[in-house]
Amino acid sequence: MAAVPPRTTTPPLTSTPFHHPSSSPLSFSNSTFPKTPQLFPAITLSTTHILPRNAKFSTSVSGIWDAITGGADSSRQALIAIRRGMVLFRQGDVAGSVAEFDNAIQIDPRQKAYLWQRGLSLYYLDRFEEGAEQFRIDVAQNPNDTEESIWCFLCEAQLYGAAEARKKFLEVGRDPRPVMRETYNMFKDGGDPEKLVDVFSKGRESDYFYASLYAGLYYESQNEAEKARVHVVASCKSPYGQRSDDYMASLAKVHCICRNWE
């Protein structure tokens, strides 16, 4: 996505969770973490990414917290745990990723309000109530996050059914990405996933990937497993799905693994 970066791959390492990236990059490779099946290529993580999606956290509040708790080091350790969790998720170790995300929250409770990655992992462990709670907390912090609103709906559709979940749908601000605006409207009001894919099939590679992924997820919320499989597998096989280091490209692969789809 040229105009808008993809889902943030890793949070920066900082003295407090939501400020400027550290000037000292810290890299990890898969060998740093517990051994898990190598489902995806080795991943190098650095601190040279965009700022987290919500940078409004008060400096003064962060400073007070760090002064009370010695939080500069705890924040760093929590962010390292988040990075480990993200790598484990990419490798297909969903349970391991949640353990790391929960560890990060235990180290620095401030992280919970921003841990959309944890919500995604909870969805694949069928812990839908906890997943919905995570996404609702995140949207409360960032009321313009289209994807978290959709994922909250996906969790609650598994709990209550799509019709009931739609009554609880979290309304958010206007997404600058046309594909996500159309996707949001489809989930919020009901719509045609085939039309969504068709509209974006000849555009940017990232748009086709996202349209295919969310078309599949929409069908999953309607309990139409075969149609869901077709579109999620298509998103994995798309050029963007195969080449991008976008966290959501890894999610599409994890989705197929969890559903035993080729």
Image (cartoon, grey):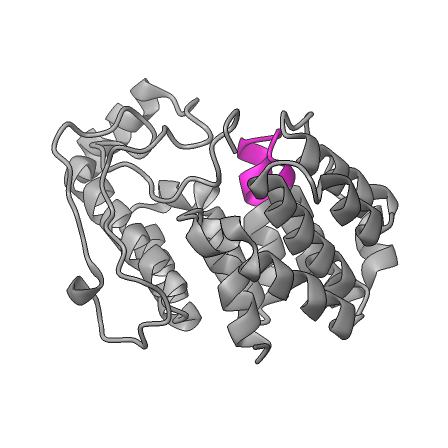
Q: Nearer the viewer, residue 176 or 40?
A: 40
Q: Is residue 208 left or right of residue 113?
A: right
* Residue 217 placement (x, y as % from top left): 69, 59
Q: Nearer the viewer, residue 194 or 79?
A: 194
Q: Which quadrant of the rendered structure holds the C terminus?
A: bottom right
Quadrant housing residue 233: bottom right
* Residue 24 placement (x, y as % from top left): 12, 33
Q: Is residue 152 visible?
A: no
The residue positioned farthest toward the bottom in the image shown: 260
Q: Is residue 41 magenta?
A: no
**Above or below, 214 relative to 189:** below
Q: Is residue 251 left or right of residue 259?
A: left
Q: Which secondary structure is most common in the magenta stretch?
A: helix
Q: For the point 64% across and 37% down, which residue is it? A: 146
How many marks overall? 0
Q: For the point 80% across and 52% down, which residue is it? A: 193
Q: For the point 36% across and 46% down, which residue is it? A: 109
Q: For the point 49% across and 62% down, which residue is it? A: 121
Q: Nearer the viewer, residue 205 or 174?
A: 205
The residue positioned farthest toward the front in the image shown: 202
Q: Is residue 139 magenta?
A: yes
Q: Is residue 208 visible?
A: yes
Quadrant housing residue 252: bottom right
**Above or below, 180 relative to 123:** above
Q: Is residue 250 left or right of residue 67?
A: right
* Residue 142 placement (x, y as % from top left): 55, 31
Quadrant housing residue 56: top left
Q: What span is in magenta?
A: 136-146
**Above or below, 186 relative to 122:** above
* Residue 223 placement (x, y as % from top left): 79, 70
